Image (spheres, grey):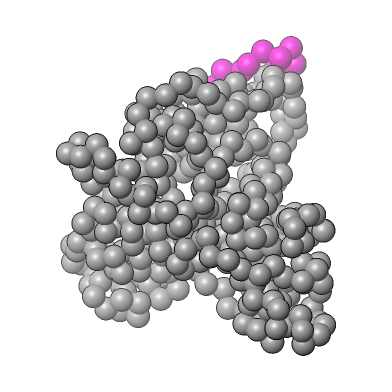
Amino acid sequence: MSEGRKGFRETIKQQKSAVIYLSIFAVICIVGIILILFVGESEDTSKNNRTDKIVKIGGVNCVPKPNIETYLLIGTDVKGKLTAETTRPTTEEANYGTEETTKEADEKDTYNPGRADVITILVIDREKNTYALLPIDRDTITAVDSLDENGNYLATTDIQLSLAYEVADGKEKSCENTMKAVSELLHDQYIDEYTALSQDAIKIINNSVGGVTVKIEDDFSDSDKSLKKGKTIKLSDDQAQHYVHDRMNVGDGSNECRMRRQNEYMKGLKKLVGERTDRNPQFPLNVYRNLNGYMITSMSGNDTSKITKAVLKNKYLGSFKIEGKSKKDDYGYNAFYPKKKSLDEVVRKLFYDEVDKNGNIIDK
């Protein structure tokens, strides 16, 4: 059986293979800036098709905020380019079949598009001039569609959110499938656009700024011995990738520890991008071109221009968190179940205004 077929079978058996914990959160956050600094001013052409209809979120009357833009940012576990050609899985596999069919099918199937290891929502409020981030646990168990070789719907299954990317084409359809799953998870919240990155994008971006300088506050001895605890280091491209995404063999192995490092990297990277753009207005355009093939995005010039103005000028509300319960599934792998109360509260805060019985907005 081919390696690609093995990988897919293990996936559809609720992750009966080793889970690779990779994260390029910092790159995902900064890519909006890199994508649009070179575009300049543009007209506001937001795809805001939301209504003022009163809805109940967690039993609370709400109306959608009038000037919200929502962007899905995906960090994949794919090394190399995201545009490489692959072969779709068989219909049996897409329907989560687990038994081998024929030798011919085994030889034909080399499909391995990767998964969405980092899933983050960027929310921009144009009316209040704010923006916020909502990281979503990749292990979240939610409804995910599977598609056939032509991108047609086959079935919906409650599986890890990260698999929404894998059960499609590894390109635009994977992004769109992930966007649909995330939208439905967030009470059918409309998502304007998406961007997905290969994990190698972090090396390209780190190289473009000559390396980001950080203080090493965790023990990397089992991951990268050159990252010595207590030292302040200008990261090489390989070091940057270890610093941003390694978790299992670093410090206490917690995601909180990794997120702290990612935030530090993002701060340093944002500063360097700004400095180099001041010296050379073409700098972000050059980085954007270097990312060709390592990034899939639906964002137009107008979209990205608007994003950069918000990220650089608006007030940052911070990173929101959906509380939930993590436990091992029947096969011993991670599954995250959001708490309904927490999910409802986050959705209300980011996307809605609460109203009284007469439909008047309640100021808070």
In the image, residue 145 sits, relative to residue 17, either above or below, namely: above
In the image, residue 301 sits, relative to residue 239, either above or below, namely: above
Of the 4 image quadrants, the one containing the N terminus is bottom right
In the image, residue 42 sits, relative to residue 94, either above or below, namely: above
Give me the residue at 65% from left, 60% from top.
169
Q: Is residue 340 left or right of residue 267?
A: right
Give me the residue at 59% from left, 21% from top.
66
Residue 57 image position (x, y, % from top left): 71, 33
Residue 344 image position (x, y, % from top left): 67, 39
> Is residue 84 or residue 65 the one in the foreground?
84
Residue 196 image position (x, y, % from top left): 51, 52
**Which corner quadrant of the image does residue 249 belong to?**
bottom left
Give me the residue at 31% from left, 43% from top.
284
Residue 290 image position (x, y, % from top left): 35, 54
Of the 4 image quadrants, the one containing the C terminus is top right
Is residue 178 visible to us here? no
Is residue 94 visible to us here? yes
> Is residue 313 or residue 101 the one in the foreground?
101
**Which corner quadrant of the image does residue 10 belong to?**
bottom right
Which residues make up the magenta segment?
Answer: 356-364
Q: Main secondary structure of the magenta part?
A: loop
Q: Is residue 119 left or right of residue 143?
A: left
> Is residue 202 or residue 130 the one in the foreground?
202
Give me the residue at 35% from left, 77% from top.
223
In the image, residue 17 sits, relative to residue 218, either above or below, namely: below
Q: How many marks?
A: 0
Q: Is residue 358 magenta?
A: yes
Q: Is residue 205 magenta?
A: no
